[in-house]
Image (cartoon, helix red, strand yellow):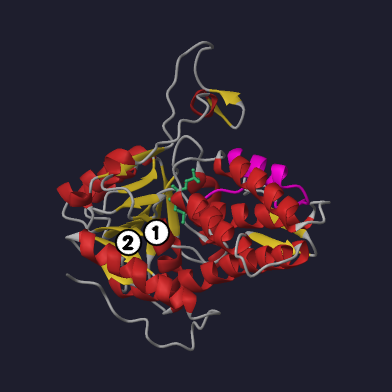
Amino acid sequence: MRTIEWHDGKVRLIDQQRLPHEFVVLEYTDYRDVAEAIKTMKIRGAPAIGAAAAFGLALAVTHCPASSRAQVLAEFERAADLLAQTRPTAVNLFWAIQRMSEVANSPQWKTAEQVVNAVVQEAQRIADEDVEVNKRIGAHGATLIQDGDNILTHCNTGALAVVDYGTALGVVRAAHEQGKRIHVWVDETRPFLQGARLTAWELQQAGIPCTLITDNMAGHFMYRGKVDIVLVGADRIAANGDVANKIGTYSLAVLAKENGIPFYSVAPTSTIDLSIASGAHIPIEERDPCEVTHIRGVPICAEGIRAAHPAFDVTPHRYVTGIVTEEGIVYPPFTLGLKRAKSSATERSAQGPPRFPQDKNTNFSYNE
Ligand code: MRU
């Protein structure tokens, strides 16, 4: 199944807290439960968070007892406010809420029923587009991968982090599907262990050779010549190409530059935030320090030890070799290329339903 799905007026999602040891599908009819699932990271990964917010809004209007258009829109606003407070860094959350809000509030809907139908359809469209977008990203990104490459990745950017397929891990998947013999170094990704729990599991399921390492081993393998390329995701990309991603990404980028290894961020254009000039303005989520002092509920330090937990860091654009999007690969200087990629994606979305893979026009790059 997809990471998140709409089924008969309900939202179904894979509980990522329980993976890899248990595969549990949660079913919700209340948008408040979806908000809680995002906050507690039962569903996580920037594009998946965006899709979850969209489906949460669809739940809010579907199960709203109101009969007037105005009442349904008031319920939509309440749900949008709550969902927007769940996680601050991934811009896909706000992108999805904004897109849903434009559709819900369109003056062409005269009745409550029309609003509900439009909102549910738009949520489904966001989910379907996400899958198409990831396949495009995979096709562009796979051109960077050579037969025999050792790829290093961080956090989880696979099918679980999106609706299906994956971003950075989608590139890995596409290269594997093309028959390239690749191997992936999987950072465990302390403290929440998305790499160990989710990425290693996804790669195992797909039959892609991988080796799990602790985060502090990355430099060792880079120095020894065992890493050919670093592929990571993004939670928000500023207009100048600075990339916010899972904590630890910045260290990897600096190590990659020091060792002459290309470092790519792989993300849909919905992750690009042109309203933010540089990474300095990206809000960084602070999570519960218990996620640092404990591993899956087991304490790893003396009681009362103070811990910090910024969940993301910002990699300055000078460390980024390129940004792989569904519209092509953007190279430095990033400002113009990111703008073009974003408007090209807006045009494509306006053209209607997904056309991949019939549409062959996927092989171009923004190289300023
Ligand atoms: O805290 P998470 O697990 O939601 O963080 C996820 C990441 O940092 C991913 O790299 C990013 O969202 C891209 S997912 C395709």
Q: Is residue 263 above or below residue 19?
A: below
Q: In the image, what residue type sits under mark 1?
A: Val
**Residue 154 rendering spot, x and y as whole percentages:** 40, 49
Say few, some or many: other residues with alpha carbon within 10 Å of mark 2 (under 14 / 14 to 19 / 20 or more): many
Element under label 1? strand
x%, y% of residue 308?
42, 24
**Looking at the image, residue 64 lies above or below residue 339:** above
Q: Residue furthest top?
A: 304
Q: Which residue is mark 1?
A: 184
Residue 18 or residue 219, whichever sits in front: 18
Whether 62 is among the magenta residues is no
Number of dots carrying numbers:
2
Quadrant of image for the N terminus: bottom right
Cβ–Cβ below 8 Å for labels 2 and 1? yes
Disc 1 residue: CB within 8 Å of ligand 1: no
Residue 26 belongs to the span the image colors magenta:
yes
Q: What kind of element bears circle 2?
A: strand
The image shows residue 250 at horizontal and vertical percentages of 29, 42
Q: Residue at 55% x, 46% y: name it.
A: 197
Q: Quadrant of the C terminus?
A: bottom left
- Where is 129 relative to 216, above or below? below
Disc 2: which residue: 150
Point out the stretch of residues depicted in magenta: 23-45
Residue type, mark 2 in image: Asn
Q: Is residue 103 left or right of residue 214?
A: right
